[in-house]
Image (cartoon, rainbow, N blue to C red):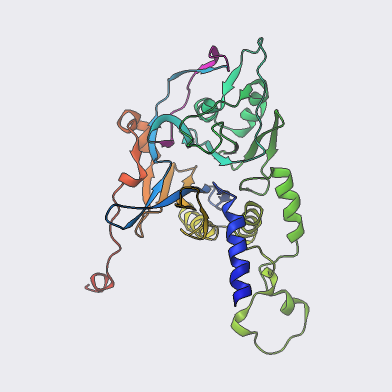
Amino acid sequence: MKVLLSAVAVVLVLLSQSALACTDIQLTAKDGAVLVGRTLEWEGVLKKAPDGTSYLASNLNYAVRAWPAGIKITSTKPDGTAGASWTTKYAYFGFADKGSPDLLLDGQNSAGLSVEALEFAEYANYQDVKPTDKDVIATDDIDSWLLGNFDSVDDIKRELPKMTVWGKPNLAIPLPLKQVPEVHLVVHDKSGKSIIIEYIRKKLHIYDNELKVMTNSPDYTSMSNNSNKYVNLSQGDALRASCDIKGQSDNRNRAGTIGLPGDYSSPSRFVKAAYLVFFGKQPDTAKEGVRSVIHILNNVDIPLGAVREKMSDGNCSMDYTQWKVIKDLKNGIWYIDTFQNIGSIVKIDLNEVFANPGRYLKPVGLTDISYPDVPKINDLLKN
């Protein structure tokens, strides 16, 4: 038992060095609905209140808000002069930091295009800006440029290589994290096409997201190659399928999934999510697809305390799943599930948001959303 506990402790220490874990998936239902799901993991610090109780403090306070069409945006160059400028064609809705409400972190536009920024530590390295470059975008503005201007990944694949994207330090990112955001982008459109956008060694790479899955570091090519090691996984009982075994196996063990990774590292989450996306039953409808996405994301959800690290100030830092979002790109519906959620999911109709974007400009913090308590079983049985 001591050996086992020691091994677990080593794993927890290793996992603690892989912060900001995110998982992104896509499913397409038989009725044509495209469902996108992603988790957001960020560190929280367990602190002591004056009364001796513990509380969880997070460095980022996520909020949701809308941006209407017709906004004039001018990005900047590293020297502070004006870069690329555009007027948004599409309204969009997404996540921002409540303290920096103009910074878009994840969103969807009125044309059904979705963009997710996932942490890409030690790999993201953006482009150099030459004095003659005009079409220059700072990393702060790349999500807004994509969602404000495009309705398909094909158009993005054509236009993005014309732009120079540089890494702008963002003061909203708390120290000691690197303040130049180290991210790669996952883009989905309502036709079901998806791409991965990565800047590595100052070069742009765009990959067709054939597996419909992405997590964090390393790069998409490495992730895809690593997943090839698991091609023998199956959803069936491989032993029973290949052998004439009589009798009943204990607990209906599914030998086909033996070897499926179960840890929280980025490559393992990628493999597990890819397996579940590939072998999971294709949903018939958008409603069924939402359920499927939720169940898949639950498999990579990081419970509070499972990944932790002792800080120099004595506090305990924990990476945990702060929120999940499921996006129905065809029907314009969002479903948000947060850490403080008590058994209920917030549903947002983006059709209403985009019809009246002015009503949704003020950021609403996720921790400010009230959630109904889980009903008591006695109440459910009254009728």
Residue 57 is left or right of residue 279, and the answer is: left
Looking at the image, residue 238 lies above or below residue 303 = below
- Asked whether the viewer can see residue 280, the reply is no
- Chain part drawn in magenta: 78-97
Looking at the image, residue 358 lies above or below residue 270 = above
- Pick the residue in front: 185 or 88: 185
**Outermost residue toward the front in this view:** 313
Q: Position of residue 44 (x, y in %)?
A: 44, 49
Which image quarter: residue 201?
top right
- Residue drawn at x 59%, y 57% is 13
- Asked whether the viewer can see residue 238, the reply is yes
- Pick the residue in front: 8 or 108: 8
Q: Position of residue 281 (x, y in %)?
A: 58, 61
- Pick the residue in front: 173 or 377: 173
Magenta stretch prevailing secondary structure? strand
Looking at the image, residue 119 lies above or below residue 358 = below
Q: Position of residue 5 (x, y in %)?
A: 58, 71
Q: Quadrant of the C terminus?
A: bottom left
**Outermost residue toward the bottom in this view:** 247
- Residue drawn at x 47%, y 37% is 174
Q: Is residue 92 magenta?
A: yes
State the count of labels. Answer: 0
Which image quarter: residue 130?
top right
Q: Position of residue 65 (x, y in %)?
A: 38, 35
